């Protein structure tokens, strides 16, 4: 590992989920590192990082390097993102004999196709019928549409690109479960988990002794925080009412606009 310094971060809002670039420099050498924008957006020029190139190339791709941010609390690996494999053995109920084994890969969503797979999963398994799950954008003319399958641009009639899931925040991350050894009739993606980092409601004391409340809200835009995935609120709002169709839809964090009946007093999720 060698120490480098971040000199630039390039993230286009329309594809920040699945593409961004970070420029790092050491001496006279500058390298452009492609990664997801959801990771790149946390880096700032001047940040010290360690870079390990794992392939002999001047232009590394997604799979050709490891990047670690050096923080006051210690090193934090930024790239590659999390990935793990495990096996699920299905045994005979009669004699415990293994019947079949699934190999499942858990990995963070990185590619545009990973996010369209999430939209597919949502649409077919979880979402209420009236929910619109995804936003799509045309890179040519900036047109935006909300739809559950990839639409074509109303102006130039090209297929639009995935932009974002309608209920996700800028800090949301997505973990996909992928069937590695599936049969042709089995789905490739079998589930996903949305992870919203807990964002503490941080206050600070100024030199004159006054307390400035929820200082992060004054730094980051609102769409970094809301709407958050907050199962407890969804559950309590649904249990207060009968199990009608619309109330059940509230249980799904992806069910579009119906917000939890009980809003937290501070507006912060996961913080009590
Ligand atoms: Zn267009």
Image (cartoon, helix red, strand yellow):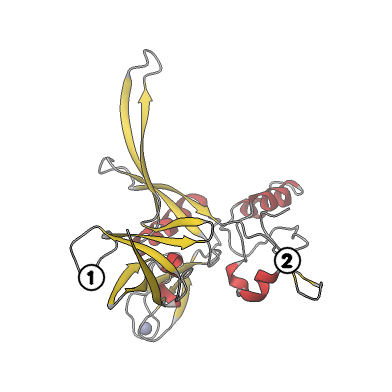
From the top left corner, tell me how far across and down residue 94 is, in percent.
39, 13
Tag count: 2
Q: Cβ–Cβ below 8 Å for labels 2 and 1?
A: no
Q: Judging from the image, what secondary structure is the residue with disc 1 in?
A: loop
CA distance separating discs 2 and 1: 42 Å
Give left or right: position of 132 versus 230.
Answer: left
Task: Say if residue 53 shows up in the picture.
Answer: yes
Residue occupying image coordinates x 18% and y 62%: 56
- Ligand 1, by image quadrant, is bottom left
- Residue hosting label 2: 203
- Residue hosting label 1: 59
From the top left corner, tell me how far across and down residue 215 is, in percent.
69, 71
The one nearer the camera, 180 or 40, is 40
Q: Give residue 225's mark.
A: none
From the viewer's perspective, is residue 222 above or below residue 252? below
Task: Say if residue 19 shows up in the picture.
Answer: no
From the top left corner, tell me how far across and down residue 112 is, in percent.
36, 64
Give left or right: position of 49 versus 133.
Answer: left
Label 2 neighbour load within 10 Å: few <14, some 14-19, many 20+? few
Point out the residue furthest to the left here: 56
Q: Quadrant of the N terminus?
A: bottom left
From the top left corner, tell me how far across and down residue 257 is, in percent.
62, 65
Label 1 neighbour load within 10 Å: few <14, some 14-19, many 20+? few
Going from N to C along the chain, the mark reached first, 2 or 1, is 1
Q: Judging from the image, what secondary structure is the residue with disc 2 in?
A: loop
Q: Quadrant of residue 213?
A: bottom right
The one nearer the camera, 115 or 157, is 115
Residue occupying image coordinates x 40% and y 82%: 154
Residue occupying image coordinates x 42% and y 84%: 142
Q: Quadrant of residue 267?
A: bottom right
The one nearer the camera, 220 or 56, is 56
Point out the residue furthest to the right here: 209
């Amino acid at each position: 590992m060698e120490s480098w310094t971040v000199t630039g971060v390039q993230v286009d809002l329309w594809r920040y989920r699945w593409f961004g670039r970070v420029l790092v420099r050491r001496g006279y050498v500058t390298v452009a590192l492609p990664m997801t924008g959801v990771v790149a957006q946390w880096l700032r020029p001047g940040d010290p990082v360690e870079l390990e190139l794992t392939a002999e190339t001047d232009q590394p791709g997604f799979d050709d390097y490891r990047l670690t941010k050096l923080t006051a609390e210690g090193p934090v690996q930024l790239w590659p993102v999390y990935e793990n494999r495990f096996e699920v053995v299905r045994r005979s109920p009669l004699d415990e004999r293994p019947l079949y084994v699934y190999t499942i890969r858990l990995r963070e969503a990185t590619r545009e196709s990973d996010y369209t797979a999430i939209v597919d999963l949502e649409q077919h398994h979880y979402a209420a019928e009236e929910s619109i799950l995804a936003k799509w954008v045309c890179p040519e003319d900036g047109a935006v549409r909300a739809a559950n399958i990839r639409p074509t641009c109303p102006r130039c009639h090209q297929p639009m690109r995935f932009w974002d899931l309608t209920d996700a925040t800028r800090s949301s991350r997505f973990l996909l479960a992928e069937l590695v050894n599936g049969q042709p009739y089995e789905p490739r993606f079998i589930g996903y988990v949305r992870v919203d980092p807990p964002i503490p409601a941080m206050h600070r004391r100024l030199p004159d002794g006054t307390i400035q409340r929820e200082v992060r809200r004054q730094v980051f835009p609102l769409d970094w925080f809301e709407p958050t995935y907050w199962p407890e609120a969804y559950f309590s709002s649904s249990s207060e009412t009968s199990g009608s169709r619309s109330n059940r839809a509230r249980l799904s964090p992806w069910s579009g606009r119906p917000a939890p009946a009980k809003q937290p007093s501070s507006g912060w999720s996961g913080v009590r």
